[in-house]
Each structure stands twice: as C-alpha cells, then as structure tokens.
Amino acid sequence: MLELYQSEGCPHCEKVRRKLSELGVSYVIHNPRLPGGMGGDVTNEVTHEELTAGGEDQIPYLVDTEREVTMYESDDIVEYLDEHYA
C-alpha cells in the first residue's frame, strides 16, 4: 500500500498526486498539517508523528508499505513511482 503525507495547495505534493493518478495507482492520503512548508500548523498529531518518524518534517512523504520504502522530495518520489509502478 502507498501512503502519501501531503498538504492540499502544496505544488510539490500536487506533482506526486498527479503522477499517482497518471499511473492509476491507489493510495491513501494523510494531511498532517496545513500548507506552509515547515511552518504549517499541525492539524493531526498522529499523522504528523508518522511523518516525522521518517526523520524529517517535510512533505510530500511517501511510504510504500509493500516494499518497506519511505522517501521525501517530490522528484525522487516521482522517479520511484515511474520505476516501480509504471
């Protein structure tokens, strides 16, 4: 299962969502905080803790539970999706 930690209005998250839709891949979205980069207000403490468990407080953050892969950075995520889900 793919899980995307993201925020509506974030252009980097939009890039990842667009790629996921283009590939027709199912995924779960988590919205741990409001837009605003590192300064966005936390709206969900549980998902925010899951986000930061990866080592950063940054979105987008992709978790691929089947492959046990986690990653930040929209360009890296898009490349990973192309490699493993295209």
Image: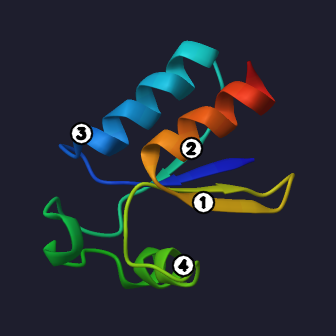
Q: Is residue 50 above or below residue 8?
A: below
Would you say the residues marked 1 and 2 are in contact, meaning their CB atoms lie under 8 Å apart?
A: yes
Say which residue appears at 32% left-offset and 35% top-offset. 14
Q: Residue at x 57, y 84 (%)?
A: 53
Q: What residue is disc 3 on?
A: 11
Q: Earlier in the sequence, mark 2 or mark 4?
A: 4
Label number found at residue 77: 2
Q: Is residue 2 left or right of residue 62?
A: right
Label 3 Cα neighbours within 10 Å, binned few <14 / some 14-19 / many ≥20? few
Which residue is under mark 1? 71
Q: In the rendered image of this protein, does residue 67 appear above or below residue 68?
A: above
Instruction: Residue under label 4, please give it.
Output: 50
Residue 75 drawn above or below residue 21: below
Q: Quadrant of residue 31?
A: bottom left
Q: Is residue 26 visible?
A: no
Are discs 3 and 1 less than 8 Å apart at CB? no
User: In front: mark 4 or mark 3?
Assistant: 3
**Crowdedness near tag 4: few (<14), some (14–19) or many (≥20) residues, C-alpha within 10 Å:** some
Badge 1 or badge 2: first in the primary sequence: 1
Q: Earlier in the sequence, mark 4 or mark 3?
A: 3
Q: Amino acid at mark 3?
A: Pro
Percent across and percent down for residue 55 are 54, 83
